[in-house]
Image: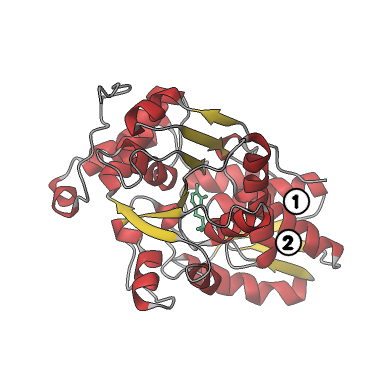
């Protein structure tokens, strides 16, 4: 039995007005772990346990680690989540509250992941990768199946945020499974974490020298190879917003829908809130990917950070969302 819940699909009045066409929200923020990650990570955990693993080890200081912790508590199997030092105390506490063991190793995710791989053999554990695993993609794909069961017709586009590309691979697989293989995907990143856009330009996954974005959840320096291959099998357009746009979209979404999400999720919403956005006039499904690493105080802090002048020079498009919870278009 799946450990994730079937999430609501809402037609958003506020965002549809902004956008000038129907906007459907797939509310993955309603998953018990706070993000879509539960779909894929829980499936990967169950498969590993069925294959004989005595415990699950993962290497994410974010929503994937929390999803593994949540799933393993339900399954009654011990979990170790290796997090890098920069993972915030609040996230560590959330993971620990789900009864997983939190181990801190290294500065960044790559260090934590290497440590998880080292630990596994001696502990009889299976390492579950946060985004580069077919089991994870198959789990994420279930969100598209749910959308297709509810919408009488396919939307004209899907909006998906891209970190390491696991969600993108899942959505692509799901679209093909429901015979919506013609529905284009807008692959959204922040400008400081645009590893997918870089990969599409290069024609192969490339490693960014650094990540410079508040959307930490999108901060994979290198996307998985499968996400790049998908671009030759499915219509996909990369799109980027600034951190300021992502954060402003989080604030506007909180006002419009009373749901608090991370900037990673705000990036996808920014494609709708942005003035003359990339999909204007087309009906869309936005994957509201969610994120547990956000509080009102944290959002206020991000808002203060993006007010610094550093942001303005790199602005892509104009963002009109701040302080405008609902502006009805006249045209
Ligand atoms: C993990 C995550 C993403 C990015 O997913 P990938 O599979 O790494 O591309 C986006 N938003 C949220 C909230 C996430 O937790």
Query: Which residue occupies the foreground of this view, 310 or 101?
Result: 310
Above-or-below relation of 148 to 331: below
SS class, disc 1: helix
Picture quadrant of residue 266: top left
For label 2, the SS is strand
| Residue 285, horizontal then vertical, whole percent | 50, 41
First-in-chain label (1 vs 2): 2
Residue 72 image label:
1
Q: Can you tell me whether the CB of the residue at mark 1 lies under 8 Å from the nearest atom of ligand 1?
A: no
Q: Residue at x 23, y 39 (%)?
A: 319
* Camera sees residue 257: yes
The 10 Å Cα crowd at callout 1, few under 14, some 14 to 19, many 20 or more, is many
| Mark 1–mark 2 CB contact (< 8 Å) | yes
How crowded pointer 2 is (Cα within 10 Å; few <14, some 14-19, many 20+) is rated as many
* Quadrant where the image shows the C terminus: top left
Quadrant assignment, res 82: bottom right
Residue 123, horizontal then vertical, whole percent:
76, 70
254, above or below 191, in the image: above
Q: Is residue 72 left or right of residue 233?
A: right
Q: CA distance from mark 1 to mark 2?
A: 8 Å
Relative to 10, does residue 290 appear above or below in the rendering? Answer: below
Q: Is residue 170 left or right of residue 257?
A: right
Q: Position of residue 248 (x, y in %)?
A: 30, 36
- According to the image, label 2 marks what residue? 56
- Residue 74: give x, y in percent of width and height: 78, 44
- In this picture the colour scheme is secondary structure
């Amino acid at each position: 039995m799946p450990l994730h819940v079937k999430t609501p699909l809402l037609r958003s009045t506020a965002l549809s007005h902004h956008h000038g066409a129907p906007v459907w929200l797939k509310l993955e923020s309603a998953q018990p772990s706070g993000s879509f990650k539960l779909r894929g990570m829980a499936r990967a955990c169950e498969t590993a346990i069925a294959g004989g693993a005595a415990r699950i080890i993962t290497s994410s200081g974010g929503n994937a680690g929390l999803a593994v912790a949540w799933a393993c508590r339900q399954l009654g199997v011990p979990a170790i989540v290796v997090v890098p030092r920069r993972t915030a105390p609040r996230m560590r506490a959330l993971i620990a509250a789900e009864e997983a063991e939190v181990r801190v190793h290294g500065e960044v995710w790559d260090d934590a992941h290497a440590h998880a791989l080292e630990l596994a053999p001696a502990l009889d554990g299976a390492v579950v990768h946060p985004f580069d695993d077919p089991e994870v993609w198959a789990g994420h794909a279930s969100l598209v199946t749910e959308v297709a069961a509810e919408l009488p017709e396919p939307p004209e586009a899907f909006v998906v945020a891209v970190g390491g590309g696991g969600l993108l691979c899942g959505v692509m697989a799901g679209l093909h499974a429901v015979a919506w293989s013609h529905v284009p995907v807008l692959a959204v990143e922040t400008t400081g974490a645009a590893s997918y856009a870089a990969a599409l330009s290069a024609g192969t996954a490339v490693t960014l020298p650094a990540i410079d974005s508040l959307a930490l959840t999108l901060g994979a320096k290198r996307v998985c190879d499968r996400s790049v291959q998908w671009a030759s099998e499915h219509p996909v357009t990369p799109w980027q917003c600034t951190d300021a746009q992502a954060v402003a979209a989080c604030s506007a979404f909180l006002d419009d829908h009373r749901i608090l999400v991370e900037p990673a999720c705000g990036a996808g919403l920014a494609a709708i809130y942005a003035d003359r956005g990339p999909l204007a006039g087309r009906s869309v499904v936005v994957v509201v990917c969610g994120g547990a690493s956000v509080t009102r105080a944290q959002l206020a802090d991000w808002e203060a950070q993006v007010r610094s002048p550093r942001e303005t020079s790199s602005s892509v498009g104009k963002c009109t969302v701040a302080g405008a919870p609902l502006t009805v278009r006249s045209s």
